Image (cartoon, rainbow, N blue to C red):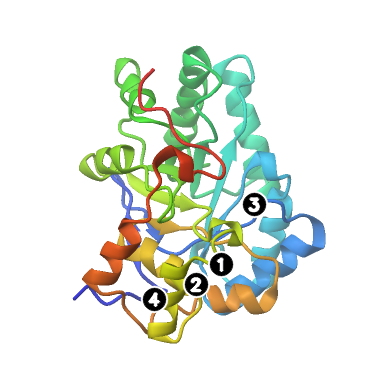
Amino acid sequence: MATRLSITDLLPLANSSVKIPRLGFGVYQSTSKVCVNSCLTALKAGYRHIDSAQYYTNEKEVGEAVRQSGLKRSEVFITTKILSPGGSVEKSYQSCLESVMKIDGEDGYVDLILIHSASSGSKSRKEMWQALERLLEGVKVKGIGVSNWGIGHIEELKSFAKFYPPQVNQIELHPFHEQREVVDFCHKNNIIVEAYCPLVRNQKANDPTLNEIAKTHNKTVGHVLIRYCLQKDWVPLPKSDTPSRIVENANVYDFELSKEEMAKLNALDQGTRGAIVESVINTL
């Protein structure tokens, strides 16, 4: 039997006293009032982890939702991501500070900042990582990590990083795209693995295996996919702007996938063909 899970579960970030909620809420393509309302719905439903990014153009709305929620700032874990290098460590640092300001004001902070992509090249990765390290040395950020990084990109940090390893790697993960090599590397190196697109953007709603397992538990395909992530020790970031679905997506703590069901879901992996957004590249 798996360890009993709860929406209040936390995981420790390496080399830190900070803990991250095991269930997150994604806000990709959620802007303006829709984002505020979706975040408020999520927070009311018990989510305590919101994942934003500069690229999503909704950092300000995420911060506004937290303020409107009535929750203490310390009760909500907020992530954002730097999209691209500024051209110097100082400029990338300032870019991150602007994100912090949008989310939590001049005297505020964010819980986690990630480098959104590895695609900008070695020099740019170094620049952005050093900017994140500078933020970590101050009081503006509590954790730093990466997104869409392969093993080679992470190991490259060893040549210059003062803070290693990154505390988080956020990648596309679901039964059809498991990226096992990089996931195993992250788990062995105490790097939290976050799963974006855990619901496969509803592209697998008719998959027979998913539906068979969902029917067994009187649950939805979405429930099965999120529960699968949790039992794989991934941090899923389901996204929705439909209030009822936001609430439903968190309703995954009253059932458990058996070893046999987990094995069936593992067998759905299609390697790089299963990606709907991006496969990481594990070599430089």
**Badge 3, how many Cα within 10 Å: few under 14, some, many 20+?**
many
Question: Could you say whether the residue bearing mark 4 is in a helix, strand or loop?
Answer: helix
Could you say which disc has been placed on residue 104 in the image? 3
Give amino acid for label 2. Val
Q: Residue at x 37, y 42 (%)?
A: 179
From this viewpoint, is residue 104 visible?
A: yes
Q: Nearer the viewer, mark 3 or mark 2?
A: 2
Give amino acid for label 1. Ala
Give amino acid for label 3. Asp
Q: Is 64 positioned to the left or the right of 213 in the image?
A: right
In this figure, which residue is indicated by the disc labeled 1?
205
Q: Residue at x 49, y 26 (%)?
A: 118
Residue 249 locus on image (x, y percent)? 53, 73
**Badge 4, how many Cα within 10 Å: few under 14, some, many 20+?**
many
Q: Nearer the viewer, mark 1 or mark 3?
A: 1
Question: Could you say whether the residue bearing mark 1 is in a helix, strand or loop?
Answer: loop
Could you say which disc has been placed on residue 221 in the image? 2
Contact check, label 4 and label 2, Cβ < 8 Å = no
User: Which mark sits nearer the N-terminus, 4 or 3?
Assistant: 3
User: Which mark sits nearer the N-terminus, 2 or 1?
Assistant: 1
Q: Is 175 positioned to the left or the right of 158 in the image?
A: right
- The quadrant of the rendering that contains the C terminus is top left
Q: Residue at x 23, y 39 (%)?
A: 189
From this viewpoint, is residue 233 visible?
A: no
